[in-house]
Amino acid sequence: MTESAPNEANPVESPVTETKLDPKDLAAEKCPSAEKLRQIEDYTVLDKEGSKHTFKSLYAGPASTDRVLVIFIRHFFCGSCQEFVRALAGSMKPEDLLKLPVSTSIVLVGCGGPALIDHYTKETGCPFPIYADPTRKLYADLDLITSYALGERPEYFRMGMVRLVADSLAQSLRHVSNGLITKAGDSSQNGGEFLFESTGEDDKQVTWCHRMTNTRDHSSIPAVARVLDSEGSVLQMKN
C-alpha cells in the first residue's frame, strides 16, 4: 500500500547514481510482439472519472502523436515513482515533445484505482495523461514483475529514502477517511517504459522498452531523453 516493504524498514542510503548514460540504459529489452499487442489492445484502462478506454487508444487513438511513450508506474503512493515523474515533468514539457523530429507524447498508467489519479497529478505536477489498470492485466501480460527489491539510488532522486518512505506513508494516511488508502495498488508491482511508434505497418509497435527490476529502477531521465531525441536537437540540451 505504501513505499515501505519488509526489507525497507530501515533503508540504507547508497550514493546517488551519477547522471551519465551507461550503455545498458539504451539497450532495448525484448519488446512485446505484434501478436501480443493485438491480444492486449482491447484491455480496459480507466481515466480519473472512472470512464473506460481501450489500452490501444492510449497510443493509437485518432488524436495520438506519431510516437507515444507509455510509462507504467508502481502504486499511486510510491514516492520513488513520484520522484521519477517529477524529474520527467521538469525535463520534458509536452510542447517540447511535439517539437521532436517525430512528434511524441507521454502517457502514464498506474496499478491503483482511478480515484487517486487527481492525487497523483497534484503530488507530482504531472502534465501527462494518467490512467489506471487496477486489474494489473496489462502489467502481467507485458511481463512487468513484482518485487520489493530496493536497488541502487537513481539519479532522478532529490529526496532521501527515509523522507520518501515517510512521505509515502503520510500520503496514504490522508486517504483513510475517504477509503482510498487501500486503492493505491499492489505495493510489490513494478513498472516500466514502452515506446510505441509506426514501423510501416498499420498499427504502432513497441520499438524500445525497459522493465523495472526493483522499486527504484525506472530508466534514467537522460536515457529517456536519448531514446526520444538521439541527436539532442530538443531534449539533450536540458539534461
Image (spheres, grey):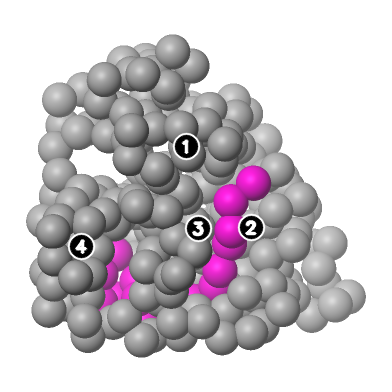
First of labels 2, 3 by sequence position = 2
- Three-letter code, disc 4: Gln
Residue hosting label 4:
205
Marks 1/4: CA–CA distance: 19 Å
Of tags 3 and 4, the one toward the viewer is 4
Q: Is residue 50 left or right of residue 36?
A: right
First of labels 3, 4 by sequence position = 3
- Three-letter code, disc 1: Leu
Residue hosting label 3:
108
Marks 2/3: CA–CA distance: 14 Å
Say whether residue 136 is magenta.
yes
Crowding near pointer 3: few (<14 within 10 Å), some, many (20+)?
some
| Image point (24%, 63%), residue name | 204
Horizontal and vertical percent for residue 188?
A: 43, 64
- Three-letter code, disc 3: Leu
Horizontal and vertical percent for residue 59?
A: 39, 64
Residue hosting label 1:
97
Marks 3/4: CA–CA distance: 17 Å
